[in-house]
Amino acid sequence: MNTTILRKSVLGIAGLAFAGGLAAGPLNHTTTAPVVDAKPVAVAVQADKPDAAKLVPHGTQGAQSRIDLNDEQTANVKAIVAATKKSGLDERAAVISVGTALQESKLENLGHLGDRNDHDSLGLFQQRPSSGWGTPEQITDPIYSTMAFQKGLKQVDGWRDMPLTEAAQTVQVSAYPDAYAQWEQQAADLVAEHWNG
């Protein structure tokens, strides 16, 4: 048996075992398949990443900030992405949501902070039970709080075409309306990393 047929036989068995858990013998062929000039396709690798133009359609505004994330913060990014998909929204909604949570809590699911608390604000988005966002238990659930934020976002006419800071401010009504803009690039990078993860 020549080495080409032997190599194809081993690869064929390994492929069948991997694909279906089946072990089957190779077909005995005396002909060899034609050699194809195979070149790697870079597009297949990048197809897993969301389109950058959809993530930041207007470009970033102003100086950008960035923080290193710990495991809890990364888990919260993943929860925001999962909630966005559950809401039936696209990557842009995830970027706005992550950017908002970066500004409001640095992606930490904050409980009551005592004297440092902003009224009764809680969770990733610093939502207030007294303002009708939900119970403290609901607001500190990352999936619930994201979906509550996005429910407000969907009520904003033209939110997809707004800069992040404008869309976030329309929902959050912050005392610092322009502060959200600084997180747009990191939010886009995080959504690109975790959207298909």
Image (cartoon, grey):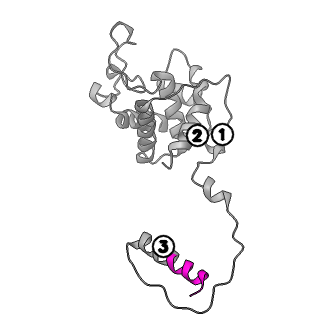
Alpha carbon separation for disc pair 1 and 3: 42 Å
Alpha carbon separation for disc pair 2 and 1: 9 Å
Point out the frontmost of discs 1 and 3: 3
Is the C-beta separation of discs 2 and 1 under 8 Å?
yes
Q: Which residue is mark 1?
A: 57
Q: Secondary structure at mark 3?
A: helix
The answer to whether residue 175 is visible is yes
Q: Secondary structure at mark 2?
A: helix
User: Where residue 39 sits: x, y (%)?
Assistant: 70, 66
Q: Which residue is mark 2?
A: 160
Magenta region, residue range: 1-10
The amino acid type, in three-letter code, at marker 1 is Pro
Picture layout, residue 41 above or below residue 48: below
Picture layout, residue 115 above or below residue 188: above
Q: Which residue is mark 3?
A: 15
Alpha carbon separation for disc pair 3 and 2: 44 Å
Point out the frontmost of discs 2 and 1: 1
